[in-house]
Amino acid sequence: MTQLVGAGAGVMSETAQPGQAVDPMRARAWWKVADQILSGLSVVGLSFVVARSVGVSHFGVFGVALLASGFVLGLSRAMVSDVFLIQFSDVVPRVRRQAAKEATGAAVLLGLVTGLLCCLAAALLPGRDLGMALFAIGLALPGLLVQDALRFVFIAAGRPAPAFALGLSGAGAQFGVVGLLVAADHDSMFPITLGWGAVALLTAGLGCLLARLLPSLRQARLWFALNRHLTVRGSLEYVLSLGALYLAYCLIGAVVGLAAIGSLWAAQMFLVPAYVAITATGSLLASRFDTWVQQGRPLRRPALLTGLVLAVMAALWGAAITVVPDAVGIHLTGPTWQGARAVLEPAVVGVVMLGLASGPGLALRAAGHGTLLRQVALLQAMLLLGLGLLGADLHGVRGAAMGLVAAHAIGALTLWALFLRESGRRRDVPVASVQP
């Protein structure tokens, strides 16, 4: 689920600075997208493997583990990885290497703190399987965050091959370990989650060897102090977007049961290609929208085209998924298919709303309306929690899915209303006074 559910919200655009080469910047954007696609698809692939082999409740436990790791990983990208890519892509190697030690040290510190919180939460949660799975995630978080940060260090240095190799080797090892555990009939989530996390730790060690650096915990505080202007904004935007969605999933699971989380995530697994397309398009078009703003070009047409094209693409993919025969669904996801089928249609509408909102979201960010975006994100976060829980209480997991879709729809319509209002005002503002 990492960076796929709700993808595109809170994207930090990489605007070109004076004297910055455009081609290297675009190349880094492409490699960043490729890396995120690989990491996201590897998690989804593992989810299919686990879904076919365990019961519905156990898959719900696996879903909670994914939510916890995905939330922390997204927070680390907002506070460390994306900031490093923006700030240190075009500096001399000596400066970049020192910053890499600080950034990876910050990732270790964040992993230790959040990992400790996960372990403490594991001791308080009911259910042995859930507690042990969360405990395993807590142990793995430092390694997971470091190996992710190291891939961004390679990309920023213009060395995408090691970054991609690190992601590919980690994905391959995770499939191997989890596949062996599943084949050995380990239906408990603890060994499966622990094996997945152990691979992340080993991959982090391999990344440190390839980069020839050790994370510096002593300089982690310096990283957060010097980059506070980006880390605070990025983490706030992330918590209000994906963070709120993850929390809504967990609360829905508390109301309806762990099987509800498994059903919601099983449905999302089939929609990953649409999420990937929306995420990639948003990352690649961010700098283009920035350029159009600097040139004083109107953004209504590109925003409309972007939103409509992505929404239609998502709708076509979703329509194809909804007609998948039950036999195929059961073959792919085992006993979790029935739960996924119950929430598949609302999930399709949700990804369509996400695609529709991408156009005005990119345009508002490029035009410097970050405050408006955060206000919309706060509104949508409250709606996700409120409507999701209300739907779960009234109509179970399908009601929860309908509540989440309603929140996404209101968020998308609000974004469009604000964008149309601001674009109308911008026509009366001199180009020189518009700050991207």
Image: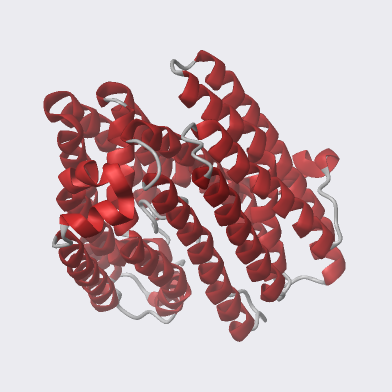
Query: What's the residue at 51%, 14% (across, down)?
Result: 124
Is residue 416 at all visible to an observer of this figure?
no
Position of residue 45 in the picture relative to residue 146 (left or right): left
Q: Quadrant of residue 307?
A: bottom left
Q: Position of residue 157 (x, y in %)?
A: 73, 71
Position of residue 324 in the picture relative to residue 219 (left or right): left
38 and 127: which one is in front?
A: 127
Q: Position of residue 60 (x, y in %)?
A: 37, 34
Query: What's the residue at 76%, 39% (across, down)?
Result: 221
Image height check: is 430 above or below 247? below
Q: Position of residue 97 (x, y in %)?
A: 83, 62
Query: What's the residue at 15%, 65% (across, down)?
Result: 319
Image height check: is 431 above or below 323? below
274 and 338: which one is in front?
A: 338
Q: Position of residue 289 (x, y in %)?
A: 40, 74
Image height check: is 301 above or below 217? below
